[in-house]
Image: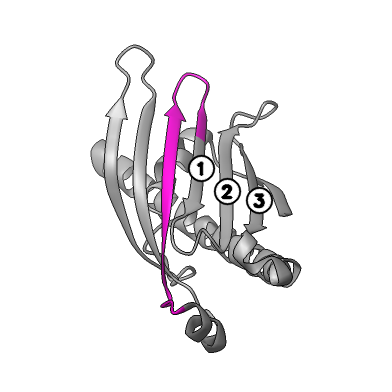
């Protein structure tokens, strides 16, 4: 098993970051994400906690030889459960791949929370556990290392893309505010 962890601070308040997260895709920086479908969404009337289940369709650039061996396509599916707690000011997103999970599983947890020292910033933590299945035990180290490098690259690109979404989101919010005061 290979582990990944990354932390980052966004220079935007939590409410803006958590709202912008739902506008992350489509995103020209992340063209591998082709669809995001909401499967279920509930709000707990007592706590205000919003839970959302989504199916994310991803087109991975998988080496041709691997696709032939596995009989797989480039289209992969990921299940994500998101929990927004407005009182604690946290957005927690947990995802796991559904496609080829018997060969390689990737469990990811992302947490956005209000910065404890600066309410105008948001702390971001991303963790992943990547584990090869028993069917590929002879290749597990190679497969896990390759997948970890790919995951790190996608994480960097995704964070940069989300920064652009945040910038666009701020411009839209400022335009709406200008419109409402005019």
Question: Which residues are the magenta region?
Answer: 71-91
Q: Main secondary structure of the magenta part?
A: strand
Residue name at image x 55 percent, y 61 percent: 158
> In this orientation, which residue lies closer to the viewer: 177 or 143?
143
> In this orientation, which residue lies closer to the viewer: 52 or 106?
106
Residue name at image x 37 percent, y 32 percent: 51
Q: Name the residue under label 1.
A: 94
- Determine the CA span between mark 1 and mark 2: 6 Å
Q: Do the residues labelled 1 and 2 touch (CB within 8 Å)?
A: yes
Q: Where is residue 156 in the image (x, y as percent from the top left)?
A: 63, 63
Mark 1 or mark 3, which has the lower sequence index? 1
Tell me the crowding category of disc 2: few under 14, some 14 to 19, or many 20 or more residues within 10 angstroms, Cα based: some
Dot label at residue 129? 3
Q: Position of residue 1 (x, y in %)?
A: 72, 54
SS class of the residue under badge 2? strand
Left or right of residue 71, residue 54 in this image: left
- Determine the CA span between mark 1 and mark 3: 12 Å
Q: Mark 2 points at which residue?
A: 108
Residue name at image x 52 percent, y 62 percent: 161
Query: Is residue 67 among the parts visible in the rendering?
Result: yes
- Determine the CA span between mark 2 and mark 3: 7 Å
Query: Is residue 182 among the parts visible in the rendering?
Result: no
Q: In this view, does 152 lie above or below 82?
A: below
Mark 2 or mark 3, which has the lower sequence index? 2
SS class of the residue under badge 3? strand
- Asked which quadrant contains residue 140, the reply is bottom right
Q: Where is residue 80 in the image (x, y as percent from the top left)?
A: 43, 46
Magenta residue check for 111: no
Tell me the crowding category of disc 1: few under 14, some 14 to 19, or many 20 or more residues within 10 angstroms, Cα based: some
């Amino acid at each position: 098993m290979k582990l990944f962890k990354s932390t980052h601070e966004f220079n935007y308040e939590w409410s803006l970051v958590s709202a912008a997260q739902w506008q992350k895709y489509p995103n020209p920086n992340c063209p591998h994400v082709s669809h995001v479908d909401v499967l279920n969404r509930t709000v707990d009337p007592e706590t205000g906690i919003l839970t959302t289940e989504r199916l994310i369709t991803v087109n991975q650039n998988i080496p041709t030889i691997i696709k032939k061996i596995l009989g797989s396509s480039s289209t992969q599916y990921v299940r994500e459960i998101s929990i927004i707690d407005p009182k604690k000011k946290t957005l927690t997103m947990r995802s796991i791949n559904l496609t080829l999970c018997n060969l390689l599983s990737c469990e990811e947890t992302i947490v956005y929370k209000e910065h404890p020292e600066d309410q105008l910033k948001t702390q971001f933590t991303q963790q992943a556990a990547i584990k090869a299945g028993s069917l590929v035990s002879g290749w597990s180290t190679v497969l896990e290392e390759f997948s970890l490098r790919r995951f790190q690259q996608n994480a960097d690109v995704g964070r940069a893309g989300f920064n652009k979404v945040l910038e666009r989101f701020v411009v839209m919010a400022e335009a709406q505010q200008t419109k409402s005061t005019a």
